[in-house]
């Protein structure tokens, strides 16, 4: 086989996105399922960029796909295949089919085909090509432009034993003679997909169930060429919480948006996507190694799954609590204004790592971690938002002066010493701890929410704490 790619006997899966936009969340799940299935069976996971639509395929989109896959830890095992670069191989197969009598030249003009569709529409018939050149002598077409069409089976039925959908049957009379090669010699998507899957040695085609109808049309090419039929597994699509097709209003953003805009961790996203339409008993928290161990196609359901951003956030919160403090500090630092001074940047990282233990229990996203840590780096006098300013009335400022006086003598700035001093102030004033903590939090962070008040004081340090309190209590 000329220019064929290396084939293999072991399990081979592929993820084949079209680079016409971002890597969307449904595509990410498809990639994940292909990756896990290949890993579970000791096979290979390959990538193919289906860039035959030259008008819509862009380099930024290709980069976004690779970036998203890399972030999710779903890189292919070999260099990616670019479909457009293999056009000559696709055309070669079309001509082989033509020579073998499994395809034919069709000289029907666009005008003729438009008239055919209009007549079928008027008669309320299915709109499909009527095979008018199927059995004619191509010599009748002369030197007019032609396309090459598949000579599809007309009798009987086609059957796919789908690993997810089960046995699916289509009457061959419902399938038309689809175009393989356009009049300009370029291959169609349907042909290119089949040739590439064969040449890449793909044994299992795992993709969205919106491709199920395509599988029957592609089956005609496979059988005509005498190639092995891959195992098909058409997985249900993801829907929104309302049961409608997933859209932007449901959270159907690019994978990069989950990282950059929502502050998700990749392990949380892949864990969540894994559980969208697949299950293994009652397990909800599933590591990558565990997923590779247990993932298989029988666990994929036939019904559409529903995307729930709140559940993803909760799962992300779990992974934040489990994450290394140093790693989180780096991720949070990336979300802050850059510091040119290397020493200052290192000092900031150290502070962030120190406070992660106090921030993690309350945070569900990296955004919340970043917001929670911001008070550490705010320059004095710190801005105070409207809600916090309401807590800083005259009596509160008097109380804060008492707090400052109690903290000032501390020579050792420890959590225990800080807590003892604050609780003593509260008891002496006949107040609950919360009545002291609220204005204290407002004065030190400028907000009404923060990590625990003792953690706030401890991580700000003695001098910064007393300075911020002084800014609030001075006349």
Image (cartoon, rainbow, N blue to C red):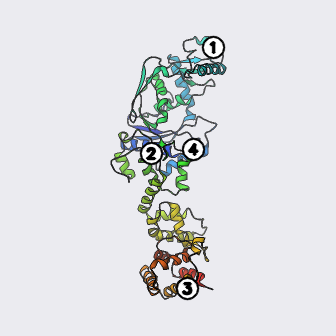
- Label 3 sits on residue: 398
Q: Nearer the viewer, residue 261 or 323?
A: 261
Q: Earlier in the sequence, mark 3 or mark 4?
A: 4
Q: Residues within 10 Å of mark 3 (few under 14, many from 20)?
A: some
Q: Residues within 10 Å of mark 4 (few under 14, many from 20)?
A: many
Disc 3 element: helix
Q: Residues within 10 Å of mark 1 (few under 14, many from 20)?
A: some
Task: Give residue 141's mark.
Answer: 1
Q: Earlier in the sequence, mark 4 or mark 1?
A: 4
Disc 4 element: helix
Task: Give residue 62's mark.
Answer: 4
Left or right for 374, reference 286 = right
Q: Nearer the viewer, mark 3 or mark 4?
A: 3
Q: Nearer the viewer, residue 124 or 289?
A: 124
Quick check: marks 4 and 2 in contact, CB under 8 Å?
no
Task: Reply above or below: 81 against 106.
Answer: below
Q: CA distance from mark 2 to mark 3?
A: 59 Å
Quick check: marks 3 and 4 in contact, CB under 8 Å?
no
- Label 2 sits on residue: 32
């Amino acid at each position: 086989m000329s220019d064929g790619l290396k084939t293999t006997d072991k399990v081979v899966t592929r993820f084949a996105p079209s680079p016409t936009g971002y890597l969307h969340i449904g595509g990410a799940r498809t990639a994940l399922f292909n990756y896990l299935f290949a890993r579970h069976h000791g096979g290979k996971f390959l990538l193919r960029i289906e860039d035959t639509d030259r008008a819509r395929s862009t380099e930024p989109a290709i980069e976004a796909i690779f970036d998203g896959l890399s972030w999710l830890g779903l890189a292919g095992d070999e260099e990616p295949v670019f479909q457009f670069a293999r056009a000559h191989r696709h055309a070669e197969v079309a001509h082989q089919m033509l020579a073998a009598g499994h395809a034919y030249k069709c000289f029907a003009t666009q005008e003729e085909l438009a008239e055919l569709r209009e007549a079928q529409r008027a008669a309320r018939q299915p709109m499909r090509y009527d095979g008018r050149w199927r059995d004619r002598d191509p010599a009748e077409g002369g030197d007019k432009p032609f396309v090459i069409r598949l000579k599809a089976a007309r009798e009987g039925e086609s059957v796919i034993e789908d690993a997810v959908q089960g046995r699916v049957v289509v009457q061959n009379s419902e399938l038309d003679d689809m175009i393989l090669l356009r009049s300009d010699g370029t291959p169609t998507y349907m042909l290119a997909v089949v040739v590439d899957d064969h040449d890449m040695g793909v044994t299992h085609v795992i993709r969205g169930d919106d491709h199920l109808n395509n599988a029957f049309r592609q089956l005609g090419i496979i059988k005509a060429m005498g190639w092995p039929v891959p195992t098909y597994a058409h997985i249900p699509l993801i829907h929104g919480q309302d049961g409608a097709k997933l859209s932007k209003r449901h959270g159907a953003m690019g994978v990069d948006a989950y990282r950059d805009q929502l502050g998700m961790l990749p392990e949380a996203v892949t864990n969540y996507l894994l559980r969208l339409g697949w299950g293994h008993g009652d397990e909800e928290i599933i590591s990558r190694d565990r997923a590779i161990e247990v993932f298989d196609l029988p666990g994929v359901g036939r019904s559409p799954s529903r995307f729930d951003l709140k559940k993803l956030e909760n799962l992300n919160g779990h992974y934040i609590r489990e994450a290394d403090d140093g790693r989180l500090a780096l991720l949070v630092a990336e979300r802050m204004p850059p510091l040119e001074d290397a020493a200052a940047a290192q000092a900031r990282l150290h502070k962030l790592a120190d406070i992660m233990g106090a921030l993690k229990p309350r945070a569900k996203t990296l955004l919340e971690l970043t917001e929670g840590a911001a008070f550490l780096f705010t320059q004095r006098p710190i801005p105070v938002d409207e809600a916090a300013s309401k807590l800083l009335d005259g009596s509160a400022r008097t109380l804060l002066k008492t707090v400052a006086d109690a903290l000032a003598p501390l020579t050792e700035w420890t959590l225990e010493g800080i807590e003892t001093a604050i609780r003593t102030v509260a008891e002496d004033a006949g107040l609950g701890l919360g009545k002291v903590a609220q204005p204290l939090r407002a004065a030190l962070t400028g907000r009404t929410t923060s990590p625990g008040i003792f953690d706030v004081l401890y991580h700000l340090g003695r001098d910064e704490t007393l300075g911020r309190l002084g800014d609030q209590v001075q006349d």
